[in-house]
Image (cartoon, rainbow, N blue to C red):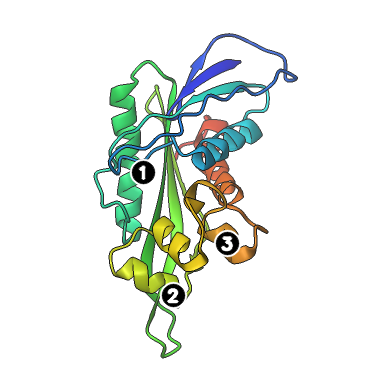
Amino acid sequence: MMRDWIYGTLRSHGEISAFEHLRLGRGLGSAGGRRSLQNPVKINAALQGFSLMFPLSIYTAHGISVPSGVPEQPFSDAETLLGAQNRVENARAAQPDADYWIGLEGGVAEQDLGDGDGASLANFAWIVVTDKHGRTGKARTGAYFLPKETAKLVRGGMELGHADDLVWGRSNSKQKTGSVGLLTDNVIDRTAYYVQAVVLALIPFRNTHLSF
């Protein structure tokens, strides 16, 4: 089935061969903190997740900039999930003729590990997918802890991507390997980090005979 994707929406155009090539359109811009799937890392992760779950389909991605309704750097699990949900709703309002909408929102949260060293700052992301029939899937990535050097900057109000650039001496790392790639030396880069959670968010769409 041929599908066009606009920020999480897939439009069906008929059956296709499983051997057809994936087509991807990327918008690489960003506007005033209204970050979205214009980030190529998020576009690629979403496309890979859909392709793994629905290998007989091909996709064209069109990133659009929509507000998250939360701070540029979400600072709790609930705030991060809300940001992903808001992006999906706003994308649907902006592109109502698509079939699926997907929002990927990264965030951080304080967590006391009980080691007497105070709270540590965990990083993670929420993925929300909604289709034109009202079905919704949600999933969260795994979490890992940021080094104190980075956490101090984030607690001081700096967005994680900018904090990573400062600590690591990089430029625009969030649209490349991301924090997880820097810390694992690309054993897990940001795209791979998101892909599994995208797959998990698509479980309700793969199992339409079940209730979620």
Residue, disc 1: 84
Q: Badge 2: how crowded within 10 Å, few (<14), some, or many (20+)?
A: few
Camera-near label (1 vs 2) is 2
Residue, disc 3: 182
Q: Which secondary structure, mark 3? A: helix
Residue situated furthest bottom in the rendering = 116
Quick check: 12 above or below 180? above
Residue situated furthest right in the rendering = 19
Quick check: 51 above or below 1? below
User: Front-most of 190 and 172?
Assistant: 172
Quadrant in the rendering for residue 206:
top right
Q: Are marks 3 and 2 in contact (CB under 8 Å)?
A: no
Left of 143 or right of it: where is 52? right
The amino acid pointed to by label 2 is Glu
> Label 3 vs label 2: CA separation?
13 Å
Residue, disc 2: 149
Q: Which secondary structure, mark 2? A: helix
Tell me the residue at 47%/68% (across/down).
Answer: 167
